[in-house]
Image (cartoon, helix red, strand yellow):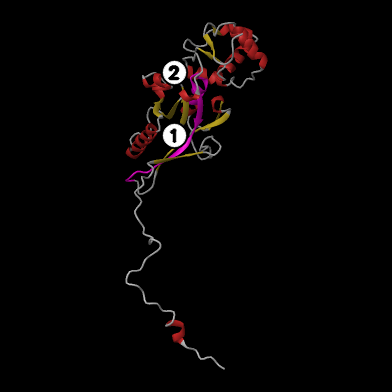
Amino acid sequence: MTNIFNPFKIFDEAWEEPDEVQEISEAPFVVRPNFAPLPIATLYWADNGGPIRTIINGARRVPTGFLPVIKAGFRSMPFDSKLECQLMQLADISSRVHFVLAQPHRMEICARGNRGKPMIYFPDVMLKVVPSFLDDLLKGMSFAEAVKVPARELLASQEWETLIIEVKADVDSRDGDERYRKKLEFAKEVYRRRGWHFLEIRETAHLKSQFVKTARFLDWRKRVAIGEADLQACREAFGANRVTTLWRLENELGGGNYGRVKAYGMHYRQIVSIDFRNGLCPDAAVYLLNGEVA
């Protein structure tokens, strides 16, 4: 027997009269405004812990290159000006500087009046320094003079201060750029909230010194190999004390240019700390930083 299609069987019987008050098991999805505070700035770091950008692209007309830095884990740090290279050479020679990193991160600052785009800032150099080094700079001592002061002991990493440096010539083309100056003010405030310190270093005030040439001279000799025999000779030079003179240390390390280069290599590795305030004189005080006395 043929079944006749009955539309009322499909629609009418399945229809249920709705209640006047219908209970809803789930709350309806409502889009509400997000009042959570947005970050003022974001810092982006390189995955390998090195510079966030290498600068060298073949399209610049300024001095560029790479500088091997012991305090950067023997990595080569990029620079795009002669002043940045000199600054890192001075930082690498200082016993009160423990870490050097060029182009450490990229900062994106959320600010009004920039057409909805973040302000992007790349600092030149980041240093990890002892508090006394930072205090000397804040009191007005030049960077070239501060690196001469020796360290008499090694401080724990928890006591280091983070210092962000922007190095410039005396006359910079961006000095009159109000937007750029505002970006530096924002960056300084971001670093202050993180407990870091920001300094803008000018050439004449901080890098016009005869010691800059000395740092370049010593930089060519810092990669000398240091072995266990050299460490033992170093202990014998100090004897039962923690301070000796540069000429005595050089003699124990082999004398002549050989012993002199070995002594400078130990200074760069913060095994000893040489007092450079009177130049490279034989009577310069040398302090034992790493290792036990003989």
Locate residue 208: give its quadrant. Answer: top left
Where's residue 199, x and y in %? 39, 28
- Image check: 24 left or right of 49? left
Locate residue 248: give its quadrant. Answer: top right
Callout 1 secondary element: loop
Q: Does residue 174 appear in the picture of this structure?
A: no
Foreground residue among 289 and 65: 289
- Image check: 2 left or right of 202? right
Foreground residue among 218 and 11: 11
Magenta stretch in the rendered image: 87-113
Which residue does the numbered mark 1 point to in the structure image? Answer: 123
Where's residue 240, x and y in %? 58, 5
Where's residue 25, x and y in %? 40, 63
Sequence-first disc among 2 and 1: 1
User: In the image, what residue occupies the spot 44% across and 18% down?
Assistant: 146
- Whole-angstrom CA distance, mark 2 to mark 1, is 21 Å
- Image check: 275 left or right of 15? right
Q: Name the amino acid type tagged 1.
A: Pro
Callout 2 secondary element: helix
For label 2, the crowd category at 10 Å Cα-Cα, with few meaning under 14, some 14 to 19 and many 20 or more, is many
Foreground residue among 223 and 190: 190
Placement of the N terminus among the 4 image quadrants: bottom right
Which label is found at residue 146?
Answer: 2
136 in relation to 171, above or below:
above
